[in-house]
């Protein structure tokens, strides 16, 4: 009886944190839109979730890459994300290519992915149009690798933007299909949509998303842009002829600048309207630029420190990959056993 009472009085074990998986392709420098829309959320999620993050360099080679540049971009992205606050002590953070199980599971899952499903993927259609000289099989089966990335770590949640919803739905379909045949094997992931994720638009054409692929460099802010460059780009940002700082339909340029200012300062649209009532767009553009500089400057300082120590970055990536490999091994062994493959 006394023993039973001791058992009953023991504190309950803490609930397991839900696991999140997310990855970013090392396709060049990151923009302010990447930071405010995704990277900053990676940082915030670390305290709430069990996070697994990766540089998606296997995905990057669906488009022809210059090897030396790809390696450099991968390391630079790794350093930039750490500088932005991704903590290798809190999260598992690694390069996708360092964990062979991604490619292994991708092949198995491709046999559970229907041709018709892949042919409906809008990203395949878009990239095929942009890279008509290299419509390769990897570009077509890309969603199977993305599904492997997520399912390998039994992720409960996946942060998604509008351009990734279709891929996550396919991942869920593949997981349900496999579980239906072989019994519970994969966690079926749910989308995680951050309500306050900023939607940063093109500074010269706010009808479009901010993108570093735009030929006009004034249309986007890079996370590594110098303060003077940032200020210059904001001064040339598109506004309108009304000269009134307020969030309203038909004021796409001002709306974009208000979203950026709000994301960097934490101020509401009403507070921003009060702050700039009676002031011109020049004052507002300057304030937005200064807020962005203040947001990015600490990241830039830390990034420069990190990028000068490649050995340290390699060690962090190796450590993260070892942790990822331990998790991945459990899943890949379970999958191989269920489908009858010798390992």
Image (cartoon, rainbow, N blue to C red):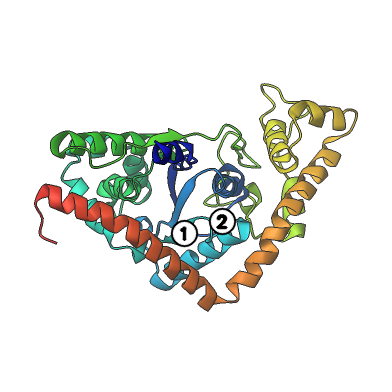
Q: Quick check: 167 above or below 228?
A: above
Which residue is outermost to the right? 278
Front position in the image: 290 or 95: 95
Residue closest to the eye, 300 or 43: 43
Which quarter shows the N terminus?
Answer: top left
The answer to whether residue 328 of the structure is visible from this angle is: yes
Question: Taking the image as drawn, is residue 26 in sight?
Answer: no
- Residue named by callout 2: 86
Q: Which of marks 2 and 1 is nearer the N terminus?
A: 2
Q: Residues within 10 Å of mark 2 (few under 14, many from 20)?
A: many
The residue identified by callout 1 is: 93
Mark 1 Cα shell of 10 Å, populated few (<14), some (14-19), many (≥20)? many
Residue drawn at point x = 66 percent, y = 30 percent: 252
Helix, strand or loop at label 1? It is: strand
Residue at horizontal 65%, vertical 71%? 305
Disc 2, SS: loop
Horizontal arrangement in the rendering, residue 9 relative to residue 201 (left or right): left
The CA distance from mark 2 to mark 1 is 8 Å
Q: Position of residue 161 (x, y in %)?
A: 48, 37
- The number of numbered discs placed on residues in the rendered structure image is 2
């Amino acid at each position: 009886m006394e023993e039973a009472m001791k058992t009953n009085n023991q504190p309950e074990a803490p609930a397991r944190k839900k696991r999140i998986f997310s990855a970013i392709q090392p396709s060049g420098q990151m923009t302010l839109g990447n930071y405010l829309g995704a990277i900053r959320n990676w940082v915030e999620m670390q305290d709430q979730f069990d996070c697994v993050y990766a540089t998606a360099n296997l995905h990057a080679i669906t488009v022809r890459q210059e090897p030396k540049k790809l390696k450099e971009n991968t390391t630079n992205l790794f350093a930039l994300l750490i500088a932005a606050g991704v903590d290798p002590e809190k999260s598992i953070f690694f390069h996708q290519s360092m964990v062979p199980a991604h490619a292994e599971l991708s092949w198995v899952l491709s046999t559970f992915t229907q041709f018709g499903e892949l042919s409906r993927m809008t990203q395949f259609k878009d990239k095929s149009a942009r890279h008509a000289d290299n419509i390769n099989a990897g570009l077509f089966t890309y969603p199977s690798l993305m599904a492997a990335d997520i399912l390998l770590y039994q992720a409960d949640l996946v942060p998604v933007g509008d351009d990734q919803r279709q891929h996550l739905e396919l991942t869920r379909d593949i997981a349900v299909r496999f579980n239906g045949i072989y019994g519970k094997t994969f966690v079926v992931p749910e989308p995680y949509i951050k309500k306050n994720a900023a939607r940063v638009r093109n500074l010269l054409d706010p009808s479009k998303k901010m993108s570093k692929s735009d030929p006009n460099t004034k249309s986007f802010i890079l996370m590594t842009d110098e303060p003077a460059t940032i200020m210059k780009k904001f001064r040339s940002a598109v506004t309108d002829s009304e000269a009134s700082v307020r969030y309203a339909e038909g004021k796409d340029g001002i709306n974009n600048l208000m979203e950026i200012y709000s994301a960097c300062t934490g101020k509401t649209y009403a507070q921003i309207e009060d702050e700039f009532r009676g002031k011109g767009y020049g004052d507002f553009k300057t304030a937005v630029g200064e807020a962005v500089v203040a947001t990015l400057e600490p990241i830039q300082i830390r990034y420069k420190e990190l990028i000068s120590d490649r050995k340290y970055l390699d060690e962090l990536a190796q450590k993260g990959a070892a942790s990822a490999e331990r998790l991945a091994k459990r899943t890949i062994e379970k999958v191989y056993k269920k489908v009858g493959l010798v390992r």
